Image: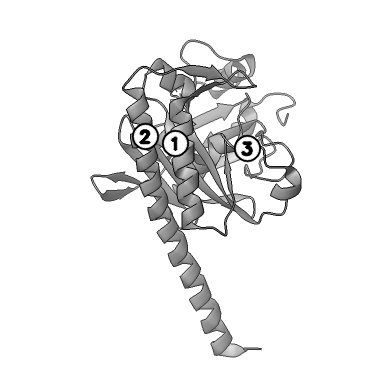
């Protein structure tokens, strides 16, 4: 058994090698996200059919084309890391519970926005380790808008091949800028907004809400409706790497692959975790 400086050197080399591999995986994921975006835009630019999945959510040829491209790319890139994609989610819990790391993919987050042709949809690729997102890539192909993050390293917006480091707005001051519908709100979100005081509402689709918080353009995204793990993981990584937080209503970070179903609990995404968000929840706010 190695001891002393030799042991320390071996650990350092192992960590350096792992860090290098994660960065290489990030660049490969950025390439896959762009390729998937091109496949999506090919469908977006013509007439396409829309099917209904078992949960009545829409499915298009673009979802499937992006799914096939990303999954094949990830399996070739890292055969040792399993892949969970929205369009191939029937992997039993007895298998998933053994995973210590896995890819979590939403090939087209915001299919309803895709169908509306408003551009507010994204490709999401995340690497999960120990239940936490450690690498995230989010790409909105219509806007050629690409963000990427590494846990403990930082988050960046890539433009014309260059990376601009992202940072959330801290401290966040009034009026708070909130990702919420301008036209309709569920009762709980409306009550939370009323308790925030002066706010500006920003309506956005898909994981772009997290991304705009990471950029410092929005401050808060409360989510009291259903989402799945692939909806949030990549953008959560970007936001956390930019200095923000994505928290369950009990104050713990949103994590992944901890239970049989893939539904997220209610959560709140914050650019400034020091905001008094618990006060916005009212009585029984942990539910």
Residue 85 screen position, x and y as percent: 56, 40
The answer to whether mark 1 and mark 2 are in CB contact below 8 A is yes
| Residue behind mark 1 | 66
Residue 128 screen position, x and y as percent: 58, 51
Residue 245 screen position, x and y as percent: 54, 42
Disc ID at residue 233:
none
Disc nearer the start of the sequence (1/2): 2
Query: Residue sitting at 70 percent across and 38 percent down?
Result: 250
| Residue behind mark 2 | 39
Query: Residue sitting at 53 percent across and 18 percent down?
Result: 51
Q: Is residue 64 left or right of residue 3?
A: left
Q: Is residue 184 left or right of residue 62?
A: right
Look at the picture and state if 199 lies above or below 37.
Answer: above
Single out the residue that lies furthest toward the top. 183
Q: Secondary structure at mark 1?
A: helix
Residue 110 screen position, x and y as percent: 47, 26
| Residue behind mark 3 | 89
Residue 161 visible to the viewer? yes
Crowding near pointer 3: few (<14 within 10 Å), some, many (20+)?
few
């Amino acid at each position: 058994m190695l001891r002393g400086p030799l042991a320390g050197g071996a650990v350092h080399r192992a960590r350096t090698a792992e860090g290098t591999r994660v960065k290489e995986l990030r660049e490969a994921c950025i390439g896959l996200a762009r390729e998937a975006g091109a496949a999506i835009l090919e469908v977006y630019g013509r007439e396409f059919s829309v099917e209904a999945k078992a949960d009545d959510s829409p499915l298009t040829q673009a979802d499937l084309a992006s799914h096939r491209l990303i999954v094949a790319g990830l399996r070739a890139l890292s055969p040792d890391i399993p892949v969970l994609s929205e369009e191939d989610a029937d992997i039993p819990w007895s298998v998933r519970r053994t995973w210590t790391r896995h890819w979590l993919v939403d090939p087209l987050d915001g299919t309803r926005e895709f169908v509306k042709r408003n551009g507010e949809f994204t490709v999401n690729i995340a690497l999960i380790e120990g239940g936490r997102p450690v690498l995230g890539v989010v790409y909105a192909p219509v806007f050629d808008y690409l963000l990427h993050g590494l846990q403990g390293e930082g988050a960046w917006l890539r433009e014309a091949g260059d990376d601009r480091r992202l940072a959330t707005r801290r401290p966040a001051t009034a009026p708070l800028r909130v990702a919420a519908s301008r036209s309709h709100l569920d009762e709980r979100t409306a009550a939370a907004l009323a308790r925030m005081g002066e706010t500006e509402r920003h309506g956005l689709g898909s994981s772009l809400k997290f991304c705009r918080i990471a950029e410092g353009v929005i401050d808060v995204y409360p989510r009291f409706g259903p989402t799945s793990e692939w909806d949030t993981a990549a953008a959560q990584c970007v936001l956390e790497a930019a200095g923000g937080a994505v928290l369950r209503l009990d104050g713990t970070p949103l994590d992944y692959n901890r239970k049989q179903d893939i539904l997220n609990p209610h959560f709140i995404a914050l650019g400034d975790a020091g905001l008094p968000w618990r006060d916005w929840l009212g009585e029984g706010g942990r539910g």
